[in-house]
């Protein structure tokens, strides 16, 4: 989400736009949305993206309105070293995600594989999404 706001031409922005246009399905949980809000409203991210807190809240509201809500039926923590990464993976696992798109691939390792969830870079997620839409 940070990269999507900060880089208007990057793969992360493409993924965000695809979610908002309902071309791909994003999964969100309440803890994950709260974490996004906390991170995205940091002064350094607001300044780099050239957006206000109100605009960030609007973007997150838009994402929440089109994303598939995930409730945790089972806690999988801890699987990863970072609790915030665990929150992302836990949302993905409980929601039955096929992919997690992140620049933090190394820290996720293969933790999602036993659950059928591949962790990929945003650019790879774009290629996968485009391939699926062509099928």
Image (cartoon, rainbow, N blue to C red):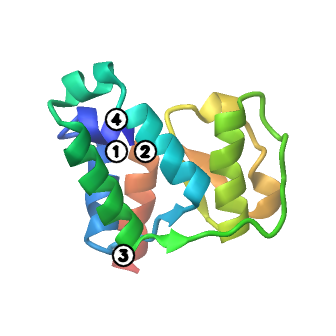
Q: Do the residues labelled 1 and 4 touch (CB within 8 Å)?
A: yes
Q: Residue 133 carries which label?
A: 3
Q: Are marks 2 and 4 in contact (CB under 8 Å)?
A: yes
Between residue 116 and residue 5, name the one nearer to us: 5
Q: Residues within 10 Å of mark 2 (few under 14, many from 20)?
A: many
> In this figure, which residue is indicated by the disc labeled 2?
122
Instruction: Give how far apart the Cα atoms at labels 2 and 1 are.
Output: 6 Å
Q: Nearer the viewer, mark 4 or mark 3?
A: 4
Asked whether residue 117 is in view, the answer is: no
User: Quadrant where the C terminus lies?
Assistant: bottom left
Q: Nearer the viewer, mark 3 or mark 1?
A: 1
Q: Earlier in the sequence, mark 4 or mark 3?
A: 4
Q: Earlier in the sequence, mark 1 or mark 4?
A: 4
* Residue furthest out toward the bottom: 135
Q: Do the residues labelled 2 and 1 touch (CB within 8 Å)?
A: yes
Q: Earlier in the sequence, mark 2 or mark 1?
A: 1
Quick one: SS at disc 3? helix
> In this figure, which residue is indicated by the disc labeled 4?
3
User: Left or right: where does residue 15 sit relative to residue 85?
Assistant: left
Instruction: Give how far apart the Cα atoms at labels 2 and 4 are.
Output: 10 Å
Instruction: Give how far apart the Cα atoms at labels 2 and 3 are.
Output: 16 Å
Q: Which of marks 2 and 4 is in front?
A: 4
Between residue 48 and residue 41, name the one nearer to us: 41
The x, y position of residue 32, in whole percent, is: 56, 50
Q: Residues within 10 Å of mark 3 (few under 14, many from 20)?
A: few
Q: How crowded is mark 4: few (under 14 residues within 10 Å), some or many (20 or more)?
A: some
Q: Which of marks 2 and 4 is nearer the N terminus?
A: 4
> In this figure, which residue is indicated by the disc labeled 1?
12
Taking 22 as reference, is 28 above or below it?
Answer: above
């Amino acid at each position: 989400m940070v990269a999507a706001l900060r880089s208007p031409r990057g793969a992360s922005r493409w993924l965000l736009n695809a979610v908002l246009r309902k071309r791909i399905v994003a999964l969100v949980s309440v803890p994950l949305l709260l974490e996004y809000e906390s991170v995205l409203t940091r002064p350094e991210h607001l300044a780099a993206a050239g957006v206000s807190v109100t605009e960030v809240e609007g973007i997150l509201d838009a994402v929440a309105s089109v994303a598939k809500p995930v409730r945790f039926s089972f806690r999988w923590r801890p699987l990863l070293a970072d609790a915030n990464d665990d929150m992302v993976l836990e949302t993905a696992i409980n929601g039955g995600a096929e992919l997690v798109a992140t620049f933090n691939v190394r820290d996720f390792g293969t933790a999602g594989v036993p659950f059928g969830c591949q962790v990929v870079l945003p650019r790879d997620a774009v290629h996968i999404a485009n391939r699926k839409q062509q099928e």
